[in-house]
Image: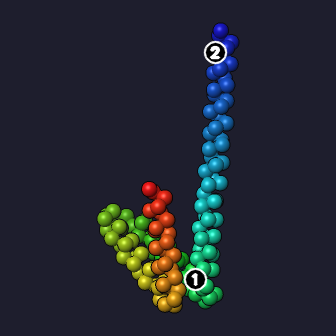
Amino acid sequence: MKKLFALTLIFAAFSFGVNAQTTKTSKSVKSETVHTDSKDKKGKMAQRLNLTNDQQSRMKEVQQSFKTKKDAIKNDASLSQSEKMEKLKALHAEKKESMAKILTKEQQDKMKEMKKHKKDQKHKSKR
């Protein structure tokens, strides 16, 4: 009986060790997948909107500038949480306006349509 208990204990310890290693691996794969999916989505959107190379590079500049400013706000220890939220909200509005200036009227309309469709799909999946 003691041998059976000892074997069970060893087996359980081994199983937990293997599971811990698997979890770490799956998290790193998941983060790589999310990063890749984000690039794919941007590429598909550029393709659907029929963006020119100039528009794509200008969008990328806006996105990079936004990320830099967003990180600066998030890491600013002198701001309270509500001040950070307020500044981030204003920054998002600024980004949206900058991106809209890059797009033609037809592309803006197409983007609004795509966002509406995505929102409708989300509501359908929640039901």
Residue 117 in picture, x, y percent from top left: 49, 72
Residue on which the image places disc 2: 5
User: Tag 1: residue type?
Assistant: Leu
Q: Residues within 10 Å of mark 1 (few under 14, many from 20)?
A: some
29 relative to 98 in the view: left or right? right
Q: How far across and down, in percent of the image, does residue 35 sit?
A: 61, 64
Task: Note whether residue 32 is visible.
Answer: yes
Return the residue nearer the eye: 82 or 107: 107
25 relative to 84 in the view: left or right:
right
In the image, what residue occupies the spot 68% across and 19% down? 7
- At label 2, counting other C-alpha atoms closer than 10 Å, the crowd grade (few under 14, some 14-19, many 20 or more) is few
Q: Residue at x 61, y 65 (%)?
A: 37
The C terminus lies in which quarter of the figure? bottom left
Q: Which residue is mark 1?
A: 49
Scheme of colours in the image: rainbow
Q: Earlier in the sequence, mark 2 or mark 1?
A: 2
* Residue sitting farthest toward the top: 1
Q: Does 24 appear above or below 61?
A: above
Q: Is residue 108 above or below residue 12?
A: below
* Mark seen at residue 113: none
Q: CA distance from mark 2 to mark 1?
A: 65 Å
Q: Can residue 68 be seen?
A: no
Quadrant in which the N terminus is drawn: top right
Q: Nearer the viewer, mark 2 or mark 1?
A: 1
Secondary structure under badge 2? helix
Question: Quarter-wise, where is residue 34 in the image?
Answer: bottom right
Give the percent coordinates (x, y) of residue 30. Answer: 62, 55
What secondary structure is found at the residue carrying circle 1?
helix
Tell me where residue 11 sits by quadrant: top right
